[in-house]
Image (tube, rainbow, N blue to C red):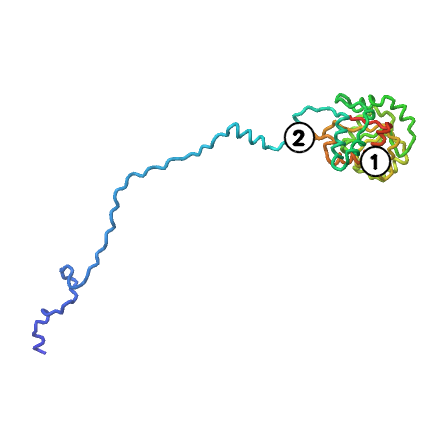
Amino acid sequence: MADDLGDDWWEERPVGAASSPGSGDEGGGDTEMKQEKTAPVPAPSKKAKQPKECFLIQPKETKEESTKTRKWRKKKITDILAKSEPKPGTPEDLQKLIKDYYSSNRSVIELEELNLPDSCFLKANDLTHSLSSYLKEICPKWVKLRKTHTEKKSVLMLILCSSAVRALGLIRSMTAFKGDSKVMKLFAKHIKVQEQVKLLEKRHVHLGVGTPGRIKELVKQGGLNLNPLKFLVFDWNWRDQKLKRMMDIPEIRKEVFELLEMGVLSLCKSESLKLGLF
């Protein structure tokens, strides 16, 4: 062992031994040092341009395009009637409506039979009359006529209108004409058919004001006899809130023509019944 201690053992160090912490050797031994990669320095960029605001300009509507849109606009009957001047009804208007209504299901010969003689028409209202003044003009001998009327279940004069509210207004407006005449409301609102039939059986009624639907039903049930009828007046020229006349409403127009076929047309041809357009 003495020989071993005497050797210079510190001079013979094995290759690849780690260096002491205090040694000043750079990169000693076989140890590989990892070098950190440095990030590339970006090149100086040019000054960024500020985005400009973009405005969309709508093309102006030309006159041709505006007229095209107006042409395709669907016109309503209220728009047409509001711009047109009111014209009084004429007997030719009623004749034309009768022909147009039956033209689809009647032959030419049958249509000719529906033509009413001019003698059955009274003077039409020229839009200057009230109801009382018009009735006095077409029936100047009304007082004498109503005194001779003794038949029940009948009236001397019928006034056809579009609604119960309109019928009440007509009754109020004929005060100067009716005098002591017995007037009956002939519409469906709040009044049953059987009640009206009983009243017609008990009383002598001179004037009836109502809607064609209820009058047609009374005739159908035998509660109203049309043979003693002398005057049938249409509330022709009056317009409702929608500017529609009585004959402009399809349902009422249908009921009017059905009523005419229940004996009115034959009475007109025999000249015992006169028609008036108020």
Q: Where residue 78 is drawn, which disc sits there?
A: 2
Q: Is residue 251 above or below residue 117?
A: below
Other-residue count near label 1 (Cα within 10 Å), few / some / many at <14 / 14–19 / ≥20: some
Question: Which structural element holds mark 2?
Answer: helix
Q: Residue type at mark 1?
A: Met
Question: Which structural element holds mark 1?
Answer: helix
Q: Report which quarter residue 12 is drawn in.
A: bottom left
Q: Report which quarter residue 66 is drawn in.
A: top right
The answer to whether the residues at label 2 and label 1 have Cβ atoms under 8 Å apart is no
Residue 177: horizontal and vertical position, in percent?
83, 24
Count the marks. Answer: 2
Question: Along the line of sight, which residue is nearer the eye, 141 or 25?
Answer: 141
Q: Which residue is mark 1?
A: 262
Q: Is residue 11 above or below residue 252?
A: below
**Distance from Cα at disc 2 to Cα at disc 1:** 33 Å
Q: Residue type at mark 2?
A: Thr
Picture residue at 48% right of the left edge, 30% below the top: 60
Image check: 39 left or right of 199?
left
Q: List the single residue furthest toward the bottom.
A: 1
Other-residue count near label 2 (Cα within 10 Å), few / some / many at <14 / 14–19 / ≥20: few
Residue 74: horizontal and vertical position, in percent?
62, 33
Q: Quadrant of the C terminus?
A: top right
Q: Quadrant of the N terminus?
A: bottom left
Question: Along the line of sight, which residue is nearer the eye, 48 or 111?
Answer: 111
Q: Report which quarter residue 219 is drawn in.
A: top right
Residue 212: horizontal and vertical position, in percent?
79, 34
Which tag, 2 or 1, sits closer to the chain's start? 2
